Image (cartoon, rainbow, N blue to C red):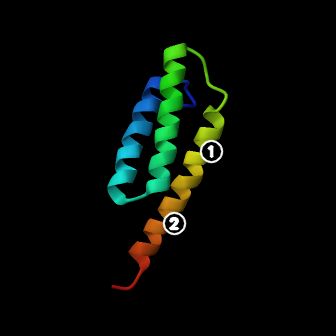
């Protein structure tokens, strides 16, 4: 959605990710998704692209990778 400059869809996806991250206890990912959602909402209201959008997206990507790695470790752990 971001690559196509569909900020409304990107905001909805960030919101959904925020909820999903909260459900599994990925607090840092949840916070990063919330920050991106806020930045996207502000961009939609002002019809501009905030200067922090790239930074917020990079933060989300970092926390996403960390959450995936943590979940993978949990799945690979012996019962």
Q: Quadrant of residue 14?
A: top left
Would you say 26 lies left or right of 49 here? left
Q: Which mark is residue 69?
A: 2
Instruction: Count neighbours of disc 2 (C-alpha within 10 A) and say few if under 14, some if 14 to 19, many if 20 or more.
Output: few
Q: Which mark is residue 58?
A: 1
Q: Is residue 56 above or below residue 65?
A: above
Q: Quadrant of residue 4?
A: top right
- Residue reaching furthest bottom? 78
- Where is residue 32 drawn, in percent x and y? 52, 45
Q: Residue at x 38, y 85 (%)?
A: 78
Q: Residue at x 57, y 49 (%)?
A: 61
- Quick one: SS at disc 1? helix
- Where is residue 6 drawn, in percent x and y? 50, 24
Report the Cα–Cα distance between label 1 and label 2: 17 Å
Res 6 visible: no
- Mark nearer the N terminus (1 vs 2): 1
């Amino acid at each position: 959605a971001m690559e196509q400059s569909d900020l409304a869809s990107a905001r909805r996806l960030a919101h959904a990710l925020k909820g999903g991250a909260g459900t599994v206890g990925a607090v840092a990912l949840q916070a990063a998704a919330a920050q991106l959602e806020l930045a996207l909402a502000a961009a939609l209201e002002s019809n501009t692209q905030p200067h922090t959008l790239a930074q917020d997206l990079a933060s989300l990507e970092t926390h996403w990778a960390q959450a995936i790695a943590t979940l993978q470790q949990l799945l690979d752990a012996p019962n």
